[in-house]
Amino acid sequence: QVQLVESGGGLVQAGESLRLACVASGDTFRITTVGWYRQAPGKQREWVGTITRKGGSTNYADSVRGRFTISRDNAVNTVYLQMDSLKPEDTAVYYCNAVVITVNREDYWGQGTQVTVSS
């Protein structure tokens, strides 16, 4: 089992920055990738980006590439989402997702953290 706790959300103005953190506990050695997703009111959950636990390779959605950066600190089992040049359309609840791939795929989710960007 893996447990995830996000933090760092808040209210900012357009153009400002925020850094979210996702702290993992439990069987963290089993994690293959950690992703960030977001869900705005009335919309489906949207993938933001992913980082691999071992090599640190990253991928991003087109909507955030160049503005958001995912990094990790395996020593403290934490993945970060640095969000720069925020836009009102970035307003959403942000969730982190840990994927464990063995024989099957297991997905673990945090409780989410609210990010609100005012214009």
Image (cartoon, grey):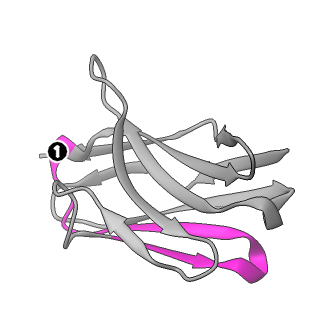
Q: Nearer the viewer, residue 19 or 46?
A: 46
Q: Residue at x 64, y 79 (%)?
A: 54
Q: Is residue 89 above or below residue 57?
A: above
Horizontal relation, residue 82 to residue 75: left or right: left
Horizontal relation, residue 102 to residue 42: left or right: right
Q: Secondary structure at mark 1?
A: helix
- Identify the residue at the far left of this view: 119
- How far from the left and from the top, in percent, is residue 21? 57, 62
Tell me how many marks there are.
1
Q: Residue at x 71, y 60 (%)?
A: 31
Q: Which residues, given as a range, are shown in magenta?
A: 69-89
Q: Residue at x 75, y 46 (%)?
A: 103
Horizontal relation, residue 58 to residue 78: left or right: left
Q: Nearer the viewer, residue 90 or 104?
A: 104
Please indicate, yes or no, whether residue 119 appears anywhere in the rendered image: yes
Please indicate, yes or no, whether residue 9 appears anywhere in the rendered image: no
Q: Nearer the viewer, residue 69 or 49?
A: 49
Horizontal relation, residue 104 to residue 81: left or right: right
Callout 1 environment at 10 Å: few (<14), some (14 to 19), or many (20+)?
A: some
Q: What is the quadrant of residue 29 in the picture?
A: bottom right
Q: Is residue 88 magenta?
A: yes
**Where, quadrant-wise, is the N terminus in this rendering?**
top right
- Identify the residue at the far top of this view: 42
Q: Is residue 70 magenta?
A: yes
Query: Which residue type does callout 1 highlight?
Result: Pro
Q: Which residue is mark 1?
A: 88
Q: Is residue 98 above or below residue 38?
A: below
Q: Residue at x 71, y 79 (%)?
A: 74
- How far from the left and from the top, in percent, is residue 16? 24, 65
- How far from the left and from the top, in percent, is residue 25? 82, 57
- How far from the left and from the top, in percent, is residue 94? 45, 43
